[in-house]
Every structure is written in structure tokens, then in C-alpha cells.
Image (cartoon, coloured by chain):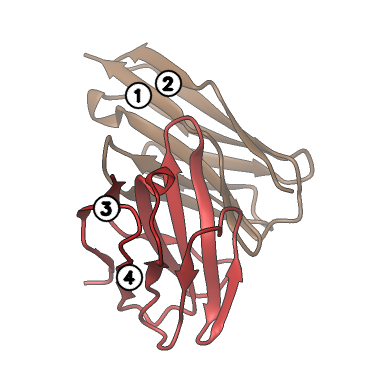
Chain colours: A brown, B red
Amino acid sequence: KQEVTQIPAALSVPEGENLVLNCSFTDSAIYNLQWFRQDPGKGLTSLLLIQSSQREQTSGRLNASLDKSSGRSTLYIAASQPGDSATYLCAVRRNMLTFGGGTRLMVKP
Amino acid sequence: EAQVTQNPRYLITVTGKKLTVTCSQNMNHEYMSWYRQDPGLGLRQIYYSMNVEVTDKGDVPEGYKVSRKEKRNFPLILESPSPNQTSLYFCASSLRVENTEAFFGQGTRLTVV
């Protein structure tokens, strides 16, 4: 059974820092990996989708990498802003989407 | 606007009273699924559907039913809700099961008393 782990569970940084969120998964037979953002009590907003054949994807200040063979993905956020404060979730897809527990990010002004 | 729409957004009900949470997508997606989100347990998949009349169990299907009679709709049915089904529920859809992005609805917060 696929298991997805996200480290750290919580992170607090000052505004302007570059930061890395980690995601690991146990079964490398995936179709893709998706990073989401969730604000408290709200729905999930898709940030980046990486296909199993890809190594990375970029969108603005966000860059996600995927190393399928080692079961790892990272989400890099450049020049963090208070508006980036949210919970970040990674999910891997085979027939089902399996989610990690999330990283709760707080960016302080 | 492309979207996944869930209704209702909030629901308080009593134990044993059957309820249905509706989910509709306007993107002609084949794949639809339901999740529940609980503190400390994260998001877990309840049921999914790869296409019309094709449904399968996720990780936590007990106490739930689904149907997929039309491509755009995927309702979640709780025949006899219990307090342990109090949760935040999300519906999602994607064009296909593989290699496509998942889009989520805004969520339904269900309280069973």
C-alpha cells in the first residue's frame, strides 16, 4: 500500500527566505505527483503536476522536482511571502490519489 | 468556468438520517473521486470512478455509497450516517486516471450528531 510522508510537518520562516518542502513515497509505480496548497477550512488548490516521466516543473516562484526511483519530491519556494502561509500537500497518483500529511507553513512579515 | 461543484457546503444532520452530497464537474472528466479529511489523519480516498457505471472502493469506503450514472455527476450517499462520519469531504475530478491534474471542489463540512 502506498504511503506518503511529508517533512517537516510545520515550518515557520521570516519573509524572503527560500525554503524546501519534502515529500517521500514508498511505491514508485506512480502516474504523477501533484503539489497542492490548502488554506484553513478551504479547498485544495493545485500548484504543480509532475508526470512520472518528468524531473521537474516550475510555476513562478515554485519549483517541484521528482526522483521517482528514490521515491522523493521536493517543492522549492523562492523568496517566501506572508501570502504563502498555508498547508502544502503532496499527492501521488496511481488508480487513487494518496496524500501526505502536509507541511504547515507560516511566513512571518 | 471549469469547476467542481459540491453541495451542500455545510450540513448538520442526525444519526441514521440518510443524506446525499452532490458533486458535479463541467470539464467532461472521466475520473471522479471522493475524499474525507480529518485532523491527524489527512486526506483519505473513499471511492473513485474511472468512468460512467465504473466505481471502486478507496481506502475508507465503509458506510458510504456512490453512483456514476452520468459523466458529470458523482454523488456520495450516506445511508445511515454516524458521528464518526463527521468530517470535511472533498470531491475531485480529472480528465483521466493517468497523467492528468486533479481538480477539487470547495468541500462539504458534515457534522453528524
Mark 4–mark 1 CB contact (< 8 Å): no
Q: What element carries label 1?
A: loop
Check disc 4 and report the residue beneath it. B23
Q: Mark 3 points at which residue?
A: B14
Residue B102: mark: none
Asked if labels 2 and 1 share a chain, the reply is: yes
Mark 3 residue crowding within 10 angstroms, few (<14) / some (14–19) / many (20+)? some
Of all chains, the one bearing label 1 is A
Q: Which residue lies furthest to the front in this view?
A: B16
Residue type of the residue flagged with mark 4: Cys
**Marks 3 and 1: same chain?**
no
Image coordinates of residue A2 in percent, x first then y, are 70, 47
The earlier-in-sequence mark between 3 and 4 is 3
Amino acid type indicated by mark 2: Asn
Q: Which of the chains bears the disc numbered 4?
A: B
Q: Of discs 3 and 4, which sits in the foreground?
A: 3
Task: Assess disc 1: are there few (<14), some (14-19) or many (≥20) residues with their C-alpha within 10 Å of its C-alpha.
Answer: some
Callout 2: helix, strand or loop? loop
| Residue at (37, 36) in percent of width and height | A61
Instruction: Select label 4 or label 2 by which is in front.
Output: 4
Labels 2 and 1 touching (C-beta < 8 A): yes
Q: Distance between the residues labelled 4 and 2?
A: 38 Å
Mark 2 → mark 1, Cα distance in angstroms: 5 Å
| Chain of the residue displaying label 2 | A
Work out whether residue A51 or residue B93 is closer to the camera in this orientation and state it. Answer: B93
Q: Residue A18 carries which label?
A: 2
Identify the residue under disc 1.
Answer: A79
